[in-house]
Image: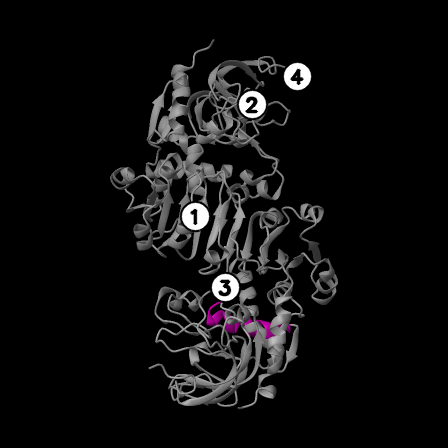
Amino acid sequence: MAKSPESEHPIKAYGYASRDTSGVLSPLTFSRRATGEKDVRFKVLYCGICHSDLHFVKNEWGMTTYPVIPGHEIVGVVTEVGSKVDNFKVGDNVGVGCLVGSCKSCQSCTNDLENYCSKQILTYGFPYYDGTLTYGGYSDHMVADEHFILRWPKNLPLDSGSPLLCAGITTYSPLRHFGLDKPGLKVGVVGLGGLGHVAVKFAKAFGAEVTVFSTTPAKKQEALDGLKADHFIVSKDPEQMQSAAGSLDGIIDTVSATHPIAPLLSVLKPDGKLVLVGAPEKPLEIAAFSLIMGRKIVTGSAIGGLKETQEMLDFAAEHGITADIELIPIDYVNTAMERVLKSDVRYRFVIDVANSLKAP
Amino acid sequence: MAKSLESEHPIKAYGYAAHDTTGTFSPVTFSRRVTGEKDVRFKVLYCGVCHSDLHYAKNEWGVTTYPVIPGHEIVGVVTEVGSKVEKFKVGDKVGVGCLVGSCRSCESCSSDCEQFCPTQTLTYGVPNFDGTQAYGGYSDHMISDEHFVLRWPENLPLDSGAPLLCAGITTYSPLRYFGLDKPGMKVGVVGLGGLGHVAVKMAKAFGADVTVFSTTAAKKQEAIEGLKADHFINSRDEEEMKAAASTLDGIIDTVSGNHPIVPLLGALKPNGKLVLLGAPEKPVELAAFALILGRKIVAGSAIGGLKETQEMLDFSAKHGITADIELIPIDYVNTAMDRLLKSDVRYRFVIDVANSLKAE
């Protein structure tokens, strides 16, 4: 007989969970495994709210097992380490992102690309090696294998840095992988939300000339004054789009709502790359000619491996890159989810877990 | 008043032209310019029949100006060179492919990618930027600026080498550009026609393990025994496609009929590349997740620059790569077009121009 979340493991834990497709979160007492020899256990200080959390709690991707405790932008302080842990000690500040396990032997894992391992284990809602479900960072503490723990850089703020663990790596990785990280390149960012605003910051830090594409003209000032983007284009304005034709080396498209990509392809130079990091529900339609003429590329990217995530955190610390956040108590989370749905946040909610999540 | 075909230019020429959207060819007398100081004039020996010739003859892309004399896989012998021509002399064997002009100063031209020049001049069918028509290789002789003339390698057959000028560069270029030219790479080729059969030969010459995808089970023997492909997969067979999941580094898709590309994406390893060379009429459809999970690429490619085309010819000569052809007299061209529409050729028609095209 299946054990309940509370009795499944020996160590008591508590958090906020969604129990059905309404996606409404409420307190849940559950349990976590004892600290294994390669495990790092840490008290959660902050956890960013990613739009994926919202998709998951409502089972919009059809893969949710309830109850689900989301949260994969988790920052905390180490309380216990296993006997074979080499890189961390009690008191260290650490982070955990979207992955807590992988097979560690396939070609992807061997190349530090655990995010493309076919047996990867997500931080929440996924079966762990022992068959039990993983629970994420909307909780009092986490335990994870050392390999999947990130060292928190000294001068990186814990609260506004936490969204980097998903939004940060998701935008940093394709900028590096697709060669859009060279000074002077012309890079577009589509959508100015959790992912988009961080993409602008990274692209600027790489020395790019950045164009923000948005359907919301009101975002122009924030894009140019707030985020220091170089240009702002209303993507629904054909004239503005025409003026940018054939001008960009690459585009990071963060928008998850259905939107036409043909106009974005036309803004690329020959050999330009359109990288999708948002996942629209409806299939995209691409006229083959729009790729053939100009040898253009459409591709996608999902988070990054652990090595690159660490590199991204260190880069962010060095360049003073954090997310723009609204810090909230955990009991505000349902309101926050509704506001995320309406894009009513500049630009990421972060849950002040340690100061607001109380033991039941 | 517009000049007639015959009086447009000072030098008489003759060939076969299509005059309307039926695409039916008949003899025509026309004219070409005198040999300018940078021009190379040559007698046409052979000209390959490319499926693009058929599209153009019937104005299927809506850009045709009639009468159209197609042919952009042209091989011949030099009869006259301009005073400033340095690389060629009378008697040399030469070729001309899909381009006869470009601006020579833009970023693309400066990086030997004339195929991306916004003011490129195609070998036939579309008016030049100076307003005059360009006429292709279904004719007695050609004239072209030296820069767009290829030196024909000593030991490359003139007739079976002609199709390399379009089909060859169109498949060679993406294999090189997308890094699929390393020994041991696993490369797929979709479609076994004019482009496809040359793609297999090029990929094998690069040392790849080649899988041919076809909807025609009967092509298996030709693929494996004739072209030395390593594997053959019936792309309509779900089981065979499933067995190939996540195995390929890249796929060259030569098919211009509408076909689903999601199963092809499934055959790619993480970071794999699907390169579209054929241009299906309907837009291709794909779910963003198919690209995001595995950072896969969909790209397009078209011919190549002049420098790379020369490199491809030299590579082909070195490795004994030619097209599999059916040599035809020029008055067979209408039948050849009918057969081409039915894919009834193994694998390219080549017109024996010098021996069959008679002056009016």
Q: Chain under label 2?
A: A
Residue at 64%, 63% (x, y): give it: B200
Spatial CA span between label 1 and label 2: 48 Å
Whether labels 1 and 4 belong to a single chain: the reply is yes
**Which of label 1 and label 4 is nearer to you?**
1
Circle 1 chain: A
Spot occupied by residue B222 in the image (x, y as percentages of width and height): 72, 65
Specify whether residue B157 is in view. Answer: no
Rendered residue at 26%/42% (across/down): A224
* Disc 4 and disc 3 in contact, CB within 8 angstroms: no
Relative image position of residue B233 (x, y in whole percent): 69, 54
Dot 3: within a 10 Å radius of its alpha carbon, few (fewer than 14), some, or many (20 or more) residues?
A: many
Disc 2 designates what residue? Answer: A82
Q: Nearer the viewer, mark 3 or mark 1?
A: 1
Dot 4 or dot 2: first in sequence order is: 4
Judge by depth and name the residue closer to the eye, A28 or A172.
A28
Identify the mark nearer the N-term, 1 or 2: 2
Q: Is residue B358 above or below residue A257?
A: below
Whole-number angstrom distance, CA of label 3 to CA of label 1: 21 Å
Residue on which disc 1 sits: A261
Q: Residues within 10 Å of mark 1 (few under 14, many from 20)?
A: some
Q: Are marks 4 and 2 on the same chain?
A: yes
Is B100 left or right of B352, judged from the image as shown? left
Secondary element under disc 2, as helix, strand or loop, is loop
Looking at the rendered structure, the secondary structure element under dot 4 is loop
- Residue A249 in picture, x, y percent from top left: 39, 53
Q: CA distance from mark 3 to mark 2?
A: 56 Å
| Residue identifier under label 3 | B302
Assess disc 4: are there few (<14), some (14-19) or many (≥20) residues with their C-alpha within 10 Å of its C-alpha: few
The residue identified by callout 4 is A2
Q: CA distance from mark 4 to mark 2?
A: 27 Å
* Quarter where residue B8 is shown: bottom left
